Image: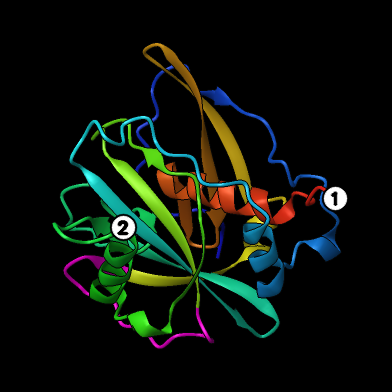
Amino acid sequence: MSRGGPQRIPRPPGTRPGGPPSWASLPEDHRHPSLDQVRAALAAGPEARRSPVEGLTSRCSAVLAPLYEHDGETHVVLTRRAWHMRSHTGEVSFPGGKQEPGETPWQTALREAHEEVALDPASVEQVGELHHLATVTSRSSIVPYVGVLPGRPRLAPNPDEVDAILHVSLADLLDPEAYRQERWGLPGIDRPIHFFEIVGDTIWGATASMLVDLLNRITTPTPTS
């Protein structure tokens, strides 16, 4: 199978190529991070930045990036959204959704992961929080959490929301052929848009931005005092 998938990308006029990722020159033997390395990198910081719309909108969401080790590789669980959904049709995303009254963002992430892919909330250990995002179209904020699982989970997609469950190794994401960047000229903004072309699917948008944040943390050397 070839890289990339059928996701519809709404590119604006004037789109142009962007730059390489921070891990472009990473040696091959450093492209297979263990869960211990992920834990250490997230514990070392930096702290998660809040999004600029937090506190200005009631549209708050949380997502979970579940990680586990299998056959010597660290994997992340992603979903492909159902093709009948009204928004973000067929896009690859983390399990997650809108925060309900009385919930913390972490509780939201766990509940949504259970509803979408039947992930047992009791099996998830919270190990980090990534930079919060603000979506351009809906003006909502997203709180991304990283959770560790004890092994490869037994999951089941909720057909109302999920077309497929994807198990993607971090090594595949760090492959030099997987990542590319585009520069989108939006009104008053020239912003980088991240893409991961994996076998059979394209990961882009907010999900790709969160993965870039995670991979930057993992592959950037921790400063020593």
Q: Residues within 10 Å of mark 1 (few under 14, many from 20)?
A: few
Where is residue 144? Give x, y as percent.
42, 54
* Outermost front residue: 225
**Left or right, residue 117 beside residue 224:** left
Q: Residue at x 31, y 31 (%)?
A: 53
Identify the element where label 2 is drawn: helix
Amino acid identity at mark 1:
Thr
Magenta includes 156?
A: yes
Q: Is residue 148 above or below residue 52?
A: below
Tell me, yes or no, if residue 88 can be seen here: no
Nearer to us of marks 2 and 1 is: 1
**Left or right, residue 135 beside residue 37:** left
Look at mark 1 in the image and give the residue it sits on: 224
Provide the residue span drawn in magenta: 149-163
Nearer the observer, 141 or 181: 141
Amino acid identity at mark 2:
Pro
Q: Is residue 57 above or below residue 77?
A: above
Where is residue 69? Give x, y as percent.
61, 80
Identify the element where label 1 is drawn: loop
For marks 2 and 1, give the CA distance.
32 Å
Q: Residue at x 34, y 47 (%)?
A: 142
Where is residue 220? Give x, y as percent.
75, 49
Q: Residue at x 13, y 57 (%)?
A: 101
How was this image coloured? rainbow
**Left or right, residue 211 beside residue 91:** right
Where is residue 20? Give x, y as percent.
70, 36
Q: Main secondary structure of the magenta part?
A: loop
Look at mark 2 in the image and give the residue it sits on: 105
Name the image quarter holding residue 74.
bottom right
Q: Residue at x 63, y 53 (%)?
A: 215
